[in-house]
Image: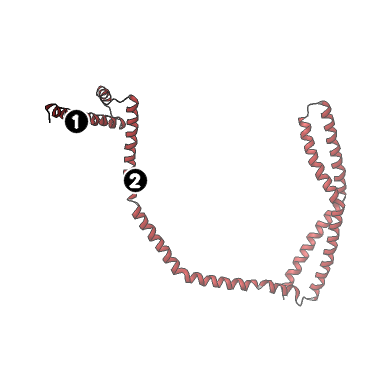
Amino acid sequence: MSVLGGLLDKIRGKRQERFTSTAEQYDDCVHKLASGQEVDLDHLAGLLDDLDKSDGDLESDVEAKQRRIEARSELDRLAEVSKQIPAKEAELLKLNDEITAYVAARKPKIQSLSEELKMLRLEVDRRGYLEHDLLNVGVPLALAQRRQALKLRQDDLFRKQEEYRNRTESAIRVVDAARVRLEDTKLRLSRATIPYDIEAIRGEAESLERRIAAYSDQIAAWAPLKAEIAAEQAAFHQESNEINRALMTP
């Protein structure tokens, strides 16, 4: 090897050592900046020149270092969190075992109660048949006569209800429809601004009000029948309840 060749090798080694040292110093400055520590700005500027780095490169390197620091910190935290998992898993397994054991111990009692409940419900369901017998089998003559009379009253009540419905149903529909139209007409009247429109809408509202009053009078004319029906319904239900209570006694 020539003298010049050996010299060049030594120069390359020195330059590599110098570059490595400069890079390590730069990395140390970046770490300090990312950690919020102060650095020698003149020294840092020299390092940037030596490494041919821009201000943007420095900013990017600091941000990357901060991400690495945060990642390391989070990994350390998660490592501590992971240490809690075995104990929690063991506790959960223990609780599940306790629940399984409890259910197994109580299962015979649960099955027994379920069977008892089923039998009780079947027993209680017979109540309907027994009530039917009391209401319909061997009914005392006096109660049978009262029930027959009540049936005739019920037929008369149905007839009156049908008559009231026939007399008033049409008028009630007219009044309900007219009231809906009147509300709409009043709304239109509140928004009208042209005198001609106001007068026309007001006339329409007055016509609807007269219509409502006329048909309401027709409905009111049958108010006595409605009151009579209500009174008879109350008396009917009272008599029916009294008969049924009496029939519940043998």
x and y percentages locating residue 192 in the rendered image: 78, 29
Residue at x-position 34% and y-position 36%: 67
As drawn, the label of residue 37 is none
Residue at x-position 35% and y-position 26%: 56
User: Which of marks 1 and 2 precedes in the sequence?
Assistant: 1
Tell me which corner region of the image, top left, top right, bottom left or bottom right, holds residue 52. top left
x and y percentages locating residue 125 in the rendered image: 64, 71
As drawn, is 208 to the left or to the right of 6?
right
Which residue lies most toward the front here? 2
As drawn, the label of residue 17 is 1
Query: Mark 2 highlights which residue?
Result: 78
Callout 2 environment at 10 Å: few (<14), some (14 to 19), or many (20+)? few
- In the rendered image, the quadrant that contains the N terminus is top left
Callout 1 environment at 10 Å: few (<14), some (14 to 19), or many (20+)? few
Between residue 9 and residue 178, name the one nearer to us.
9
Q: Amino acid at mark 2?
A: Leu
Residue at x-position 16% and y-position 30%: 9
x and y percentages locating residue 215 in the rendered image: 86, 45
- Up-down relation of residue 240 to residue 2 (above or below): below
Q: Amino acid at mark 1?
A: Glu
Q: Secondary structure at mark 1?
A: helix
